[in-house]
Image: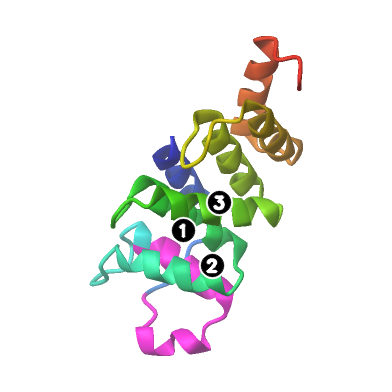
Amino acid sequence: MHGKCLRRRRRRSRTGVGAHPAGKRGHMDIQAIHDHAVQVLAGKVPGTDRSAARALFAENAARGHVGSMVFLGIVLLDGVHGPQDIPAGVVWVRKAADAGHSEGEFLLGMCLAEGTGMERDLEQAIVWLRRAADKGHEEASFIFAELARRGHSDI
């Protein structure tokens, strides 16, 4: 589930240009670091180990970049280019959801629906999926509609 989300997020992210030397990161703005991390993760920065994207997302997420929180949550949940850490992934997805990011809301809803890293809670899953759907998140809208079709009276 999450790997598919990661591919979709990569397609939606802005394209960065070229490599940014690590020594100049301090001079890059937070969005530029995020964009660069997306390019590193996608393997589009020659000579850069793709696992370096995790550190860039972590640095940026700690600085408050919500998109990096989503990406960090995904790579931790799925173990992309490093060890899987589901509890930490859920923490970052929740932070993004709490900040109002529709992908974070969707991912948190899915974690709650599936019991990934937390106890399964369909009622809360529906709340988060509805929030994401209300913001136009297509996959959340589809899943929310499917839950409604199945007759969940609490939606």
Name the residue beneath numbered marker 3: 93
Q: Which mark is residue 61?
A: 2
- For the N terminus, give its image quadrant: top left
User: Does the residue at mark 3 contact the one at mark 1 (Cβ under 8 Å)?
Assistant: no
Earlier in the chain: of badge 1 and badge 2, it is: 2
Q: Which mark is residue 2?
A: none
Name the residue beneath numbered marker 1: 72
Outermost residue, front direction?
119
Q: Give the range drawn in magenta.
A: 19-40
Label 2 amino acid?
A: Ala
User: Does the residue at mark 3 contact the one at mark 2 (Cβ under 8 Å)?
Assistant: no
Question: Residue 32 placed where, x, y %?
Answer: 53, 74
C-alpha gap between disc 3 and disc 2: 11 Å
Question: Residue 42 placed where, x, y %?
Answer: 36, 56
Question: Residue 12 placed where, x, y %?
Answer: 54, 50
Q: Which of 83 and 119 is in front in this view?
A: 119
> In this figure, which colouring scheme has been used for the structure?
rainbow
Disc 3 residue crowd, few under 14, some 14–19, many 20+, Cα 10 Å: many
Dominant secondary structure of the residues highlighted in magenta in the image: helix
Q: Which of 64 and 31 is in front in this view?
A: 64
Task: Describe the element under mark 3 as helix, strand or loop.
Answer: helix
Label 3 amino acid?
A: Val
